[in-house]
Image (cartoon, rainbow, N blue to C red):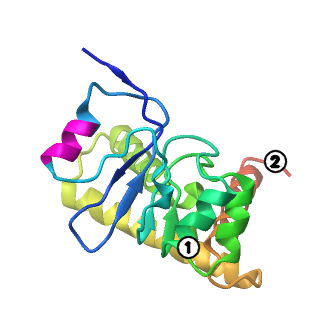
Amino acid sequence: MVKELDVPGICCTCNSRWSCLSLSNSLKIGDRVEDYAQQFNVDFHAANKPWGITCDVAFPCACENEIDGDDARELLNNGCRCVTECANIPAAQEAMDVLLESAILYSPGKASNAAGVACSGLEMAQNSSKIRWTREEVDLRLRTIMIDIHETCLRAAEQAGHKGNYFTGANIAGFIKVANAMMDHGNT
């Protein structure tokens, strides 16, 4: 039986070097989040946003605008060194501005979610050519794609005079990729 949990936020602090945060606004998962927290002895915070908890890395991943400006400032004040979007625009504009003005690494969804898109592309390539790659070959191809995306984002940001700004680099690189594809198809 699936029970709807009234849980706007969850937080799990793993026992490794990194603390990881995740937020979901209306979970329908039949007690599994709380059970997971109990089984692995991690914190579970029902009805709370996790952004006030000290962490090194945060992964907003539930919905648009789940982090506002105050949440972003709270993450920074608590020592967060990296925010990686794992959804479509989980940071509201004010949060983006706060994160971009800070010295932390801020990876927009279009860059950090690229692995999922790349996996779909690799799957389509295998299917259309009727071949099957080994797990190691798929992993190597995906790693190569992600390294290229990373380097492309950094290069685009630097060329635009915003060295190290992953957000700007991802936007510029993404725009150029789409514009080139359109021109390749005759759209000028």
Q: CA distance from mark 1 to mark 2?
A: 47 Å
> Residue 19: image x %, image y %?
34, 66
Seen in the image, is 134 located left or right of residue 86?
left
Seen in the image, is 147 located left or right of residue 153?
left
Task: Provide the secondary structure element on which disc 1 rests.
Answer: helix
Question: Which residue is the site of mark 2?
Answer: 187
N-term-proximal mark, 1 vs 2: 1
Chief secondary structure of the magenta portion: helix
At x 63%, y 53%, the residue is 91
At x 48%, y 37%, the residue is 8
Nearer to me, 176 or 62: 62
Q: Amino acid at mark 2?
A: Asn
At x 60%, y 58%, the residue is 71
Nearer to me, 149 or 63: 63
The 10 Å Cα crowd at callout 1, few under 14, some 14 to 19, many 20 or more, is: few
Residue 184 visible within the image: no
Question: Which residue is the site of mark 1?
Answer: 77
